Image (tube, rainbow, N blue to C red):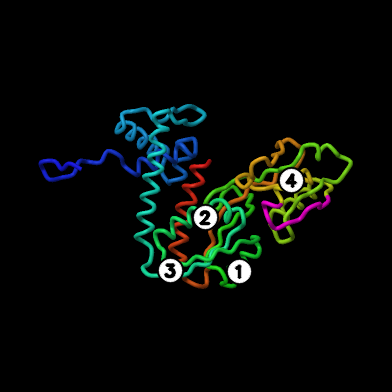
């Protein structure tokens, strides 16, 4: 990089804070929602977007009564902005990590263990090869019990929450019904259910809401494995319900107007052991929170 005659480096043209605001506006679809997400007023968000457009000399967002949409030029910047913010997150997380080695026992549900976690944990371990991470996959009720008994340091899991606001939420997604439509046409027969075993919050919510709506059902397939349940649904054995982000390809999603009850949303949280402090676990917990939020935003 060239240094000017005064001995100073050229002034940077992109501000990470402005980029963070821009990404939030794109991900939430409105300046107001972006303000709620990062704790700024709508007018402040609007001013930051205008400043970024002035710096880049291009229109980044199109504004309308329905919200904001990204322009072609904004879409180009969006990819670079996500990369820059992830680099910032990596750098800060690396500086905050404790020196030396440590062991972390992380509990999670199968859907995370298969999809979101492996690439994030891989990056973490490359930066800190002396850390040892033990991942335990299981049902939410079992993971919660292990956290309380100090068998686990961290637990990442989905939980059903119907309240509009919840603290400490990494993200929220709807629960949707899946299955073949022809199974709903047999109104004179109980609904065939493909479902998790006792102790799973999905099972409790599904059975309670069906009972509240007066719909009869029968259990045709039970498993603690999400992949197994989804395979059963694909084969036409019955209907079930999953968080939208966990549904695999070729699993038929039922229309919201199919006559089945709305099951609400799931929220995703990272829970920490309150009884035992573990510096390595705290470091990994912070790293997971930062990177899971950005990963979900990219895939939204």
Q: In the picture provided, is 159 more to the left or to the right than 80?
A: right
Q: Residues within 10 Å of mark 1 (few under 14, many from 20)?
A: some
* SS under mark 3: helix
Q: CA distance from mark 3 to mark 4?
A: 43 Å
Q: Residues within 10 Å of mark 2 (few under 14, many from 20)?
A: few
First in residue order: circle 2 vs circle 4: 2
Q: Which residue is mark 1?
A: 146
* SS under mark 2: helix
Q: Which residue is mark 2?
A: 118
Does the magenta segment cover residue 227?
yes
First in residue order: circle 3 vs circle 4: 4
| Residue 222 to residue 250: above or below | below
Q: CA distance from mark 2 to mark 4?
A: 26 Å
Q: CA distance from mark 1 to mark 2?
A: 22 Å
Query: At which x and y percent is residue 189?
Result: 88, 43
Residue at 67% across / 40% down in the picture?
A: 250
Query: At which x and y percent is residue 235?
Result: 76, 44
Q: Which residue is mark 4?
A: 233
Q: Nearer the viewer, mark 2 or mark 3?
A: 2
Q: Nearer the viewer, mark 1 or mark 4?
A: 4
- Classify residue 95 by image quadrant: bottom left
Q: Residues within 10 Å of mark 3 (few under 14, many from 20)?
A: some
Query: At which x and y percent is residue 134?
Result: 53, 66
First in residue order: circle 2 vs circle 3: 2
- Quadrant the N terminus occupies: top left
First in residue order: circle 1 vs circle 4: 1
Instruction: In the rendered structure, find residue 279 and report the number of the disc placed on it.
Output: 3
Q: Nearer the viewer, residue 156 or 64?
A: 156
* SS under mark 1: helix
Farthest residue, direction left: 5
């Amino acid at each position: 990089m060239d240094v000017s005659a005064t001995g100073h480096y050229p002034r940077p043209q992109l501000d990470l804070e402005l980029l963070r605001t821009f990404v939030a506006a794109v991900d939430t679809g409105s300046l107001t929602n972006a303000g709620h997400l990062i704790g700024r007023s709508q007018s402040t968000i609007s001013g930051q977007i205008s400043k970024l457009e002035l710096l880049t000399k291009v229109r980044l967002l199109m504004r309308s009564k329905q919200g904001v949409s990204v322009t072609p030029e904004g879409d180009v910047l969006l990819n670079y902005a996500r990369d820059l913010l992830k680099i910032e997150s990596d750098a800060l997380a690396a500086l905050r990590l404790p020196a030396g080695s440590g062991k972390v026992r992380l509990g999670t549900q199968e859907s995370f263990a298969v999809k979101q976690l492996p690439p994030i944990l891989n990056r973490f371990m490359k930066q800190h090869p002396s850390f040892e991470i033990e991942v335990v996959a299981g049902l939410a009720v079992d993971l919660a019990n292990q956290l309380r008994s100090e068998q686990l340091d961290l637990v990442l899991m989905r939980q059903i929450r119907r309240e509009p606001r919840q603290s400490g939420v990494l993200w929220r997604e709807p629960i949707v019904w899946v299955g073949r439509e022809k199974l709903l046409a047999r109104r004179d027969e109980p609904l065939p259910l493909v479902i998790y075993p006792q102790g799973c919050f999905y099972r409790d919510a599904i059975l309670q809401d069906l009972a509240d709506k007066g719909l009869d059902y029968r259990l045709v397939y039970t498993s603690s494995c999400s992949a197994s349940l989804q395979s059963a649904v694909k084969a036409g054995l019955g209907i079930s319900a999953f968080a939208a982000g966990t549904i695999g390809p070729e699993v038929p999603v039922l229309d919201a107007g199919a006559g089945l009850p709305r099951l609400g949303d799931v929220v995703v949280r990272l829970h920490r052991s309150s009884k035992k402090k573990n510096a390595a676990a705290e470091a990994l917990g912070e790293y997971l929170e930062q990177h899971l939020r950005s990963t979900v935003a990219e895939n939204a």
